[in-house]
Amino acid sequence: MKYLTEFWDFVDTRLIVRRISLFVTVYMSYESFVWAAEFATTTDKTGAEVGLIIAAVTGPVAALQGFVLKVYSDGRL
């Protein structure tokens, strides 16, 4: 039990969970925008349709990234 408590103290003092959530969100944003670029170059849809699809996919991811970055920066010690 002592080692488990020490482990969680280590995780809490170094803010590891918060940093992992930031990096996972940044990676998700990167992947979604790479997908959007590949989709835009390979699709046969019109420009308006492509724009709407890309906005529908990347919009929520960008909003999530904004929220996580705000929480990360507001919680800094």
Image (tube, helix red, strand yellow):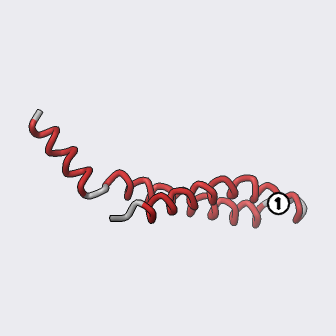
| Picture coordinates of residue 35, whole percent (x, y) | 65, 59
Is 7 placed above or below 77 here?
Answer: above
Q: Where is residue 10? Give x, y as percent.
A: 20, 51
Residue furthest top as drawn: 1
Return the residue at label 1.
50
Q: Amino acid at mark 1?
A: Val
How far from the left and from the top, in percent, is residue 45? 87, 58
Q: Residue at x 14, y 45 (%)?
A: 6
Work out which quarter of the rendered image holds the N terminus and state it.
Answer: top left
Identity of the residue drawn at 76% across and 64% down: 40
Q: Is residue 17 above or below residue 48?
A: above
- Image quadrant where one finds the C terminus: bottom left
Q: Would residue 29 be found to the left or right of residue 72 on screen?
A: right
State which quadrant residue 7 falls in. top left
Q: Residue 39, position in %: x, y?
A: 73, 60
Most foreground residue, 38 or 3 = 3
Please give left or right for residue 73 compared with residue 44 in the image.
left
Q: Is residue 15 left or right of residue 30?
A: left
Helix, strand, or loop for circle 1? Answer: helix
Would you identify the image quadrant in which residue 73 lies? Answer: bottom left
- At x 48%, y 58%, the residue is 71
Query: 10 or 38, which is in the foreground?
Result: 10
When asked about the image quadrant of residue 54, the answer is bottom right
Vertical placement of residue 39 versus 8, above or below: below
